[in-house]
Image (tube, helix red, strand yellow):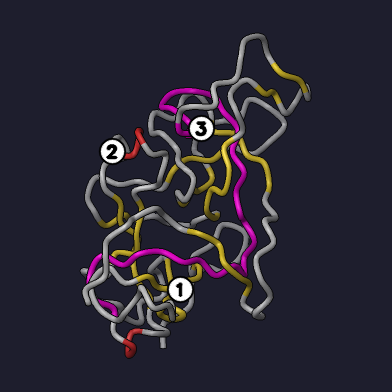
Amino acid sequence: MANTSRINGFKPVKHLNGSPYNGQANLYEVPSTEAVPVFVGDLVKLSDQAATSLYPAVEAVVGASAQIAAGPILGAVVGIVNSKFDPVAGALSSGSISLDTPVYRPASTKQFVLVCDNTDVVYEAEADASVAATSIGLNVGVGASAHTNPLLTGASPMYVYSTTAPDTTSTRPLQILGIVNRPDNEIGTNSKVLVRINVQSYGSVGVAGV
C-alpha cells in the first residue's frame, strides 16, 4: 500500500547513541525583521538579522525553489512561545491568550521559539521521492513548499528533498540514517525517514555520505 503524504516538518525522536529525545530545547528569538513565518517542525538557522533581546536570533530555512540551499542548520523548532509572554521579563503582557488557533510565529513579528539544537539528534521527516534502503548513509537535501500554506494547521511544510538522489556530497545538509519501521510506512515515495543534520551551526561542517 502506498504511503500517505503528511508533511509536518522535522520531529526529533532520539540521539545518535540510541537514547530517546526528552524534549530538551533552547530559547531563541525570531526578530520582527524576518518576513517568513516559523512553524513547529521547521528547520532554522542563525539569522543574519540582529537579535534585540538576550537570546540568539534565528530564521526559517527557506529558499526560492523546492530544494533549499540551506547552509549550516541549527536545528528544528519544537515549540512556539505565545506572543503574550515575554521570556526576558518573565511576565505576560496585557490581553488574553487565544487557545483556538494554531500556534506559529507570524511573518514580521518578534516572537520566541524553542529549538532542538543538539548536534547529535536524529529527526523523523517525510521524503518527497522514493528512498531506497541503499540510500541509508548518503546525504540529501531539504525541501519546502510555500511558507504561507500551513497557516490553518500550524504544521511545517518542510521535508527531506530526495527528488535529487541522495549521494556522498559532504556539503548536503542532511544524512539519511534509516527508514522508519512502522506498519504505516514502507520504502517508496513519501516514506518517513530518519536523518541527522550533516551541516550544523554548532558542530559538523559536513561529512561525506557513505
Quadrant of the image occupied by residue 147 = top left
Which residue is more in the foreground, 174 or 123? 123
Mark 1: secondary structure: strand
Mark 2 or mark 1: name the one nearer the start of the chain.
Answer: 2
Instruction: Identify which amino acid the numbered label 3 is placed on.
Output: Gln
Q: Residue furthest right?
A: 90
- Location of residue 190 with respect to 64 vertically, above or below: below
Q: CA distance from mark 2 to mark 1?
A: 24 Å
Q: Dot 2: within a 10 Å radius of its alpha carbon, few (fewer than 14), some, or many (20 or more) residues?
A: few
- Amino acid on which disc 1 is placed: Leu
Earlier in the chain: of badge 2 and badge 3, it is 3
Check if residue 105 falls in the magenta segment.
yes
Q: Which residue is mark 1?
A: 194
In percent of width and height, residue 134 lies at 32, 90
Magenta stretch, residue numbers: 102-131
Task: State the residue at coordinates (35%, 33%).
Answer: 151
For image coordinates 35% across by 34% down, the residue present is 152
Question: Which residue is tagged 3?
Answer: 49
Q: In the structure shown, which secondary structural element does the residue marked by tag 2 occupy?
A: helix
The quarter in which the C terminus is drawn is: bottom left
| Residue 34 belongs to the span the image colors magenta | no
Q: Are marks 2 and 3 in contact (CB under 8 Å)?
A: no
Residue 209, given in percent of the width and then of the height, sits at: 41, 83
Q: CA distance from mark 1 to mark 3?
A: 31 Å
Is residue 137 left or right of 128 when viewed as pictured?
A: right
Identify the image quadrant of residue 7.
bottom left
For discs 1 and 3, the disc positioned in front in the rendered view: 1
Residue bearing mark 2: 149
> How would you rate the neighbour count of disc 1 (Cα within 10 Å): few for under 14, some for 14-19, many for 20 or more?
many
